[in-house]
Image (tube, rainbow, N blue to C red):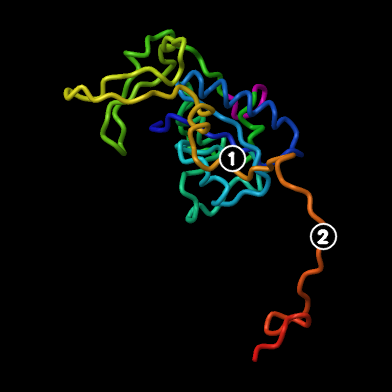
Amino acid sequence: KDANIVGIVVGTLGVAKYRNVIEHLKCVLKKAGKKSYTFVVGKLNPAKLANFAEVDIYILVACPESTLLDQSEFYRPIVSPLEMEIACNQAREWTGEYSTDFRDILPGASMYVENLDSGESSDSRTDVSLISNRVRVLGIRETPTVSANPGQDLVLRSEAMTVASVSENAGEYLSGRTWKGLEQKLGETPVTKAVEGQYGIAVGYQNESASS
């Protein structure tokens, strides 16, 4: 419930209805007032997820046998779709029943609970976090007004009139990073002929001149 930015990690492309559960998760997260982004990273490891420091928590969409992971080396928590629903679906209550199959929370399944919109305003749906002891707002927040120059808005940070730029989306945030991956530089690298390199073992290459 404390997370604001949620990453949906697709860990399988072969299990039926994985697209359905992704759309279902996006809908539940949107009603809970959270931003969600989908990641397809292949084989999951801590180094891949560590590239996205702005994500607060990840939801793993995978086969039932791979849903539960050893999270001791990961920098952010990884939960199952059912655990996310327990936290964000206001209509679902914890009954002690658990399932690692994400298809069980889809419409028509045995554990499906409809996420009803209570119609309450976001100001009235608040509670206190047991982790940070801060008041948190649940539900859809009002959409901020988008200016003509996104990323150039200034907001008041303190009584000392200090200001900072605001980034409204992850794409704009990532564009400001100094490291953006390998640069191909197509057409900028001069073409050279291939030359024969050294061969042999590291202690003494065969075409290496003997030291005096």
**Which residue is outermost to the bottom?**
212
Q: Which mark is residue 60?
A: 1
Magenta span contains residue 110:
yes
Q: Label 2 vs label 1: CA separation?
A: 45 Å
**Vertical placement of 64 versus 16: above or below?**
below
Q: The N terminus lies in which quarter of the figure?
A: top left
Tell whether 127 sits left or right of 50.
left
The vertical placement of 151 against 73, above or below, is: above
Q: Earlier in the sequence, mark 2 or mark 1?
A: 1
Main SS of the magenta part reads loop
Q: Position of residue 16 (x, y in %)?
A: 75, 33
Instruction: Locate residue 195, reporting x and y percent.
Output: 81, 64
Q: Which quadrant of the view contains residue 212? A: bottom right
At horizontal 46% and vertical 41% (from top left) the residue drawn is: 53
The residue under the point 51% across, 33% down is 174
Q: Amino acid at mark 2?
A: Ala
In-front residue for pair 178/129: 178
Q: Which residue is mark 2?
A: 194
Q: Which region shows up in magenta?
A: 107-112
